[in-house]
Image: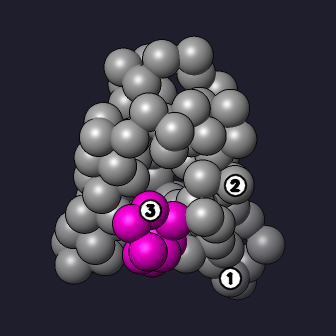
Amino acid sequence: MYQTSYPRSNNRQQEVTREYSRILSAAVVSAQFRQMLLSNPGMALTAGFGGEKFQLNNEDRNRLTEIRATTLADFASQLNVAMKAPVMGRSAVAAD
C-alpha cells in the first residue's frame, strides 16, 4: 500500500479549526491552561477547559500534541503550519 495525501472535507476542516480556536482561546484566558498546553498538550486536551472537552479525532489530537513550544505565540504558529499539512491516508495498490 502507498501513503497518499488528500485534502480534508471543508466541513471537517471547519470543525477542526473551530476546536483548535477553542483551545487557543482557553490558553489566552487561562494562565493555568496555557502552561499545561505548553508543557503537556495531551494532558491539556484530556483535561478540557471550563467543564468542556475538546472534540478532536486521534490524528488531529496527535498533530497538536506533537507541538513543542515555550510561548503561546510559537504554539499557535506551529499549529498553523500543522493545520496546512495534508492528511495522510492509505490508498489501494494500483493494478498493473
> Which residue is at 30% across, 36% downward?
28
State how far apart marks 3 and 2 are (Cα): 11 Å
Looking at the rendered image, the disc whose residue lies closer to the viewer, 3 or 1, is 3
Tell me the amino acid under the disc marked 1. Ala
Tell me the amino acid under the disc marked 3. Phe
Q: Which residue is mark 1?
A: 92
Task: Name the N-terminal-most of marks 3 and 1.
Answer: 3
Looking at the rendered image, the disc whose residue lies closer to the viewer, 1 or 2, is 2
Task: Name the N-terminal-most of marks 3 and 2.
Answer: 2
In the depicted structure, whether residue 21 falls above or below residue 12 = above
State the SS at label 3.
loop
Residue 26 in percent (x, y) is at 34, 49
Answer with left or right where residue 46 lies relative to residue 8. right
User: Magenta region, mostly helix, strand or loop?
Assistant: loop
State the SS at label 1.
loop
Residue 58 in percent (x, y) is at 64, 71
Q: Nearer the viewer, residue 96 or 85?
A: 85
Q: Which residue is mark 2?
A: 43
Residue 35 in percent (x, y) is at 56, 32
What number of labels is visible?
3
Crowd tier of the residue under label 1, counting other residues whose Cα lies within 10 Å: few below 14, some 14–19, many 20 or above: few
Residue 53 lies in the magenta stretch: yes
> Which residue is at 22% across, 78% downward?
11
Does the residue at mark 3 contact the one at mark 1 (Cβ under 8 Å)? no
Q: Nearer the viewer, residue 80 or 88?
A: 80
Tell me the amino acid under the disc marked 2. Met
> Which residue is at 38% across, 41% downward?
30
Q: Which residue is mark 3?
A: 49
